[in-house]
Amino acid sequence: MAIVTESAPAAAPSTAAAQPQETVDGFKLVIEALKLNGLDTIYGLPGIPITDLTRRAQADGIRVLSFRHEQNAGYAASIAGFLTQKPGICLTVSAPGFLNGLNALAHATTNCFPMILISGSSEREVVDLQQGDYEEMDQLAVAKPICKAAFRVLHAEDIGVGIARAIRAAVSGRPGGVYLDLPAKLFAQSIEAEAGRKSLIKVVDPAPKQLPAPDAVKRAMDLLKSAKKPLIVLGKGAAYAQADADIKALIEKTGIPYLPMSMAKGLLPDTHEQCASAARSFVLPEADVVMLIGARLNWLLSHGKGKTWGGKSSKDWGNQKFIQVDISPIEADSNVRIDAPVVGDIGSVVAAFLKDIASVPRAPADWVNAINERKSKNVAKMGETLAKDPSPMNFHSALNVVRDIVKANPDAMLVNEGANALDFTRSIVDMYKPRKRIDVGTWGIMGIGMGYCVAAAVVTKQQVIAIEGDSAFGFSGMEVETICRYDLPVCIVVMNNNGVYRGTDVDPTGRDPAPTVFVKGARYDRIIEAFGGVGANATTPAELRKAMEEAIRSRKPTLINAVIDETAGTESGRITGLNPTAKKK
Ligand code: ADP
Ligand code: TZD
Ligand code: MG
């Protein structure tokens, strides 16, 4: 296909020989391809060669959220993918910008979130001969091992195909991160407008339903019917699938107790009578049949074995049989035997289960009663702890406030990262609606905070509440400027305990601060004031409550520095056991 410049005369087709030919360039084709597929938001950071892409995308009605660091734009795109089932788009410049975006691309792949990282790149001929181009890097090769798929487009007429392939790869089957490499030269290429228009693809059925095989459904239902102590575990795949009503029906019609993984909290309200979260350490080893719905048996579930599951040693399997519902056909048996794998999309699988639900006996009363007994004991114990009002404030007394605020604002999005700040929030703050809690995910990464806040506010238009460890906040803290710039309704609470886990470590040599300790008594609230946001310092639960209520009432960007007892946390939060130490404390 001929490439002509904007005003070049047409190559003499019969009648309109003298007319200047209407053309379209690469920039425009990328924008039109995204819009055609309903991708209306870009999270990115401008620079060579994509500055004009950000400008023209904005002029053409795409929402362009411009960040201070690509990692945060990438995390925003990844979680937008989780919330919308459409690939979140992150746009970066070449080599260093691309590398900054890679962490999020890998994170999206690991967490099964659909995302497309689009990076501009340098001159192919120069890059491939390693002749030292501006920001030279073979980005496609670097991205490949950490994403689900990677593509490069060299010709303007292939942009439509490139974006269509990226969309399909991101959202079909197990969702993940996709890399799309767009070299600088592509953007300025022009092709005849009509040919350009025809080259674009509106992707039909990008995430096709995957119906489960009937015999797989029957095998799973037969196993479930045989259970004396059944348990359902809901993972973030179940939250992603947006099959909320059917999942609720499955749980309520069978009366089976369920455990939500962190980002599946709220799929049914955490206060639901069948929620077994408060008896987790009882139900996991005791259950005889466990149905996993969109949850992997990775480290977060102790690999399905060991003492957590009733095994005698860390490698020993428990006695439960597993049903695993997952879209990935290779997930089953990854850690322990899966007796009844059901491969399909969760919506279709749960719908198939529901057809036969009447023949599943209700969960036996003695099992349910035993769980309820544990639950009420643990809930009462937690109630006592939460009722205390120590000075200085600790995680519990601060989070007791957050718990009330979230209860009063069940539509608010909750972003959460840190170690103790994460673990205590997850266990103390109940969620009431699906996909309201977004956090550190499969890797337990720090740095998702402010990127997630921006995307959560932009996608849902709801109030966002971020509960951040002071260390965690530091990874993306500069994006408070972004939050202020777009005037997003985000209330950030920094749980300031002067450091990573605790603020009490000292350098035994007396030379430097300990590696885990930050400036003591830091005032994170002042950071947001520099950009016109509201800062507040809270040393008591009452002050915290007042500041949070005001933030939600005003919907103004707000950062509350919550002063937490620096001795209150534990090393690594709840996962102390994973931490190799020279000498066990
Ligand atoms: P959690 O961390 O909450 O336990 P994981 O990320 O480990 O959850 O597991 C999510 C699982 O859900 C993945 O194995 C993924 O393949 C699966 N999944 C994602 N979307 C769907 C879907 N629509 N249908 C079925 N399975 C899905
Ligand atoms: N770097 C990255 C990207 N992810 C990580 N998880 C870590 C480092 C290691 N890490 C944790 O696992 S939690 C944490 C770090 C640095 C911070 C904990 O401190 P915090 O939370 O202030 O955020 P608490 O409340 O003080 O425990
Ligand atoms: Mg801390």
Image (cartoon, helix red, strand yellow):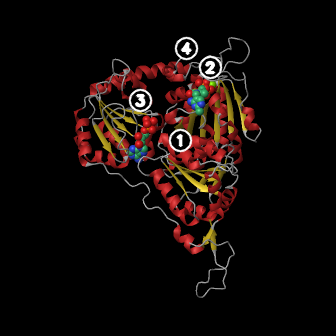
- Element at badge 4? loop
Q: Is residue 443 above or below residue 462?
A: above
Q: Amino acid at mark 2?
A: Arg
- For the residues labelled 3 and 2, the Cα–Cα distance comes to 26 Å
Q: Is residue 197 above or below residue 163?
A: below
Assess disc 2: are there few (<14), some (14-19) or many (≥20) residues with their C-alpha within 10 Å of its C-alpha. Answer: many
- Of residues 116 and 41, which is closer to you in this image? 116
Label 1 with label 3: CB-CB less than 8 Å: no
Q: Which mark is residue 106?
A: 1
Instruction: Place residue 224 in its image quadrant.
Output: top left
Q: Residue furthest right?
A: 530
Q: Amino acid at mark 4?
A: Ala
Label 2: which residue? Answer: 502
Mark before the other along the chain sequence, 3 or 4: 3
* Discs 1/3, front: 1
| Picture quarter with the C terminus | top right
Mark 3 close to ligand 1, CB under 8 Å: yes
- For the residues labelled 1 and 4, the Cα–Cα distance comes to 31 Å
Mark before the other along the chain sequence, 1 or 3: 1
* Discs 4/2, front: 4
Q: Is residue 496 above or below residue 584?
A: below
Label 3: which residue? Answer: 301
Say which residue appears at 66% left-offset and 21% top-offset. 515
- Element at badge 3? helix
Q: Amino acid at mark 3?
A: Leu
Mark before the other along the chain sequence, 3 or 2: 3
- For the residues labelled 3 and 4, the Cα–Cα distance comes to 26 Å
Label 4: which residue? Answer: 582
